Image (cartoon, rainbow, N blue to C red):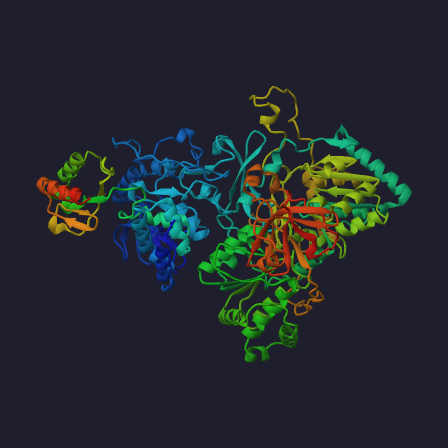
Amino acid sequence: MLPDELREALEKQIAHVDHPRELVVDAMLALQDHYGYLSDEAVEQTAAMLGMSALEVEELSTFYTFIYREPVGKYVIHVCDSLICWMDGFESIKNYLCQKLDIEVGGTSADGLFTLLPVCCIGYCDRAPAMLINRKVYGPLTPGKIDQILEKLRSEA
Amino acid sequence: MPKIIIDDRDIEVAPGTKVIEAAEQLGIMIPRFCYHPALGSVGACRVCAVKFLQGPFKGVQMSCMVDAQDDMVVSTTDEEAVAFRKSVIEWLMLHHPHDCPVCDAGGHCLLQDMTVSGGHGIRRYPGKKRTYHDQYLGPLIQHEMNRCIHCYRCSRFYQEFNGYRDLGAMQSANQTYFGRFEEGILESPFSGNLIDICPTGVYTDKPSRYFGRRWDYERSPSLCINCSLGCHTIASSRYRKVVRQEARLNEAINGHFICDRGRYGFSYNSLKQRPRTALFDGQTASIDEGLAVLKQRLQAIVDTDGSAAIACAGSSRNSLETLAMIKRVSQARSWQPPAYLIDDAITAKVKTAISVLDPDLAVEMREIESADFVAVLGADPLNEAPMLALALRQAQRKGATIAVFDPRPVCLPCEFTHLPADPDAIHTGFGAVINTALDAAVVDKLDAPAREFYSSLAAGEQTFTFQQTEIDTLAEKLKTCQRPVMVCGTEIVSRQTPALAADCAALLQAAGKAAGLFYVMPGTNAFAAGLLTDENVSVETLITAIEQGSVKALILVECNPLWQFPDRQRIEQALQKLELLAVTDYVNSEVVPKANIFLPTTTLYESGGIYINQEGRVQVVEPAYRGGIPIAETGNGDHPPRIYDSQIPGVEPQAAWQILAQLIDIGQQINANDLRTDIQHWLIKSESGFNQLPGLAQIPPLGTRFFQAPNSQKHFECQQPNGGSTDDGRLEVLVTERTFGTEELSAYSACLQELANAPCICMHSSDAQQLNLNDGDQVALELNGGVIEARLQVVENMAPAMLIIPRDGKLNWQQMETGQTRIRRDQIRKVE
């Protein structure tokens, strides 16, 4: 169930725009923040609020990398696999993350803290190889830096 | 007009023609996936690459994205273009499962053709193929996503062209998935077109799955007879069974598509319970024996009561040959004038519509797509003539205003303005719109009759309840439009509405607009039936005559009055009172077991026939196959069947017109083709309405239109509705059509039965509130003949003080009194 406060806030926002569907990404992100991921229920709630069909929301939710249609860990690591990061060692960074967290790309670590997802360019080519964790960017990465980052996040969790 | 050279051949094409279309006009089929004439170009699949040698573009370009222009020289065979296309098709085939041997699209698969024509033969990709989970999409369509090449045709058709929102493209890149949010039945009643439009086997026809390859089928151009539009189809038959229908391109009527009712409404043709032998008094007989008994008994009735004691009734699903033969026999034998339509009101409305539809006003369905204002007067397109709804959507997509004046909760796959007017208020409401829309300066220049008609539009009492602002908004749109079309129904409207629609169209034309007129009629051949029927003759009048004792024998020719007549008790009593009831039909309708004599007839697929659609288009259908009991049935699952006979089993049925001809002793001497010609000659000679009917040989494949009203002399005579009905607190009852479940022939299709929602009775929320009823309640209507029980649907978008009952075979709704239009509120109660 969506808390009334959140629903009312969204409805208020929607009432202020000409075409409710222009807020679809905002609504999906808001519901994702609330549920932790965009559940089937959340897709349907988004659709209902914006006068869209569930499919129309699903078309967008599955297109965007930052909308999670499955439960994810507390920290979502988006490791960049785009051109510059790839040239600067994306492959070994990815492998290191997999080994360190004992997961495959797309998986969540056993402690439920980390989910590893690839992303195609986050605009930090100057800091390649780079990754993004919960909206914060890290780079240029080395195995040592990764250890530190993961350790810090673990301790904060 | 641009002139372009493609592969050393030049052609002049209309401005805006794409190179891929210009090539097609030359007979050069450039490979394509995402391009489809009905969907347009998107340039996504890259397989239509050609080389531009000279002109404003140079090099390899997509032929679907470039308009043909002067001085262009294009090569489709240039080495570079060929190599490009070869690479494209190779990468499109990377993940394809190569399961052609078990794929129903195999043999008529665009992907197969393009792979071969693209020159890709050997697979080089060593990687693992991507796979998908398929979805259940309902009883009509089998989903098989692994075969997908991501051309996007399905989602573009489904969402853009067709206007439904439950199928689309999900995910991205290599993982792109076409389907629904959740498994389930597709909402669109046009979903079957996905099968035709998919270039490979992602969507295949489910009811005919694994039945055969395209080349196994006898494929025959055919016609849909499940509503009055007469869309073109292709019927595929195999092993003595029609198994599949597809849309057949027709630029005047249905374009590239058909609705699901039309696509799957053919099952009645091969049903196990289809009656194929003649019967009299419960005994099986040959048709000749049956006919002999019929003749003998008819003679006995003539001897005692005179020939006027015999009556014959057809229906709007008869072919023109049958309709004509019914009349010819009735006249030759001095029987009662034959009835074709269910009651006087329908007969009158259809006759009016025919009489005012003149060549200056009439538009084809495809012309509606380019209208810029469409007024729908008392018609429910999606339910009465589904493809019309799709035409309205295309008009709306191009910016047309669609205004629907109809009391029912009309639903259309596009934006439209709904003014829920009761049948009388359609006049005053739309009258007010036209009245407001035309300037005094324009009106002053009109002829006197047009001017009088114009002023009469505002004269009537304002019986509508919509806001003045709605009228004004529509009037403003109507004022500025150039190509308005009046779409008018003939079922629930008052008797004057068909004439009103014509007069309004004529008035708008007089006011300088290219106005058009389009009717929807009750049944495939209602136009022809309306032409042949006498004024004031209907099934209802025949029933009265039976009750009065003046008619003792009734012959029902492919006519099941129990399906449509609102008073079942009355009609059953009347049928019992008859001394002789003879029925000829190709379906096992409810009247068949009641018949003293039954003679089996053939279907459209076995005998073909002539059908005239609601715009007066005469269309000839050739038989699709020879007929007979399906092999699956005679062989009892075994194949080949081990019955040895010189004759195909189950071909005894004859066309109804052949059977009828024998009642006036002309059937035996001449063969079927000559008899057909003979019927046509008789029609042209004896029926004034048909003297313009073209000869069989002159009817082109697209059909040809013929009109009764020679240019506008009958216009501006429309009367105001009587009004009459004062508010006495009762609810007006409208019995109406649904897309699935109310049309008699398609109701025999099992797959469509699965689609038809449980029939609901509809009521406006204000009435429901007053009666203390809620949406979803089970309600009982206590009527004279019995009780109708159904779920109640409470809606906002309909006229108040009304009750909408679907004419659904499952509802047993025929409990009304003849002519009953109102029901007291205390006759409605909730069932606990």
Whether residue B2 is visible, yes or no, is: no
> Does residue B468 appear to the left or right of B587 in the view shown?
left
Query: Where, quadrant-wise, is the C terminus of chain B in this rendering?
Result: top right
Q: In this view, does B447 lie above or below A150?
A: below
Query: Which residue is painted at 56% across and 74% down in the image?
Result: B436
In this rendering, would B204 be left or right of B751? left
- Image quadrant where one finds the N terminus of chain B: bottom left
Residue B385 position within the rendered picture, expressed as x and y whole percent measured from the top left: 57, 51
* Number of marks in the rendered image: 0
Toward the viewer: B58 or B749?
B749
Work out whether residue B257 or residue A43 is closer to the camera in this orientation and state it.
A43
Q: Is residue B789 visible?
A: yes
Residue B329 % position (x, y) = 78, 45
Residue B359's spot in the image, x, y percent?
Answer: 60, 61
Furthest residue in direction right, as rendered: B304
**Displayed quadrant of residue A13:** bottom left
Q: Where is residue B459 in the image (x, y as percent from the top left)?
A: 65, 75
Residue at the image point whose x is 59% and y is 63% from the top: B361
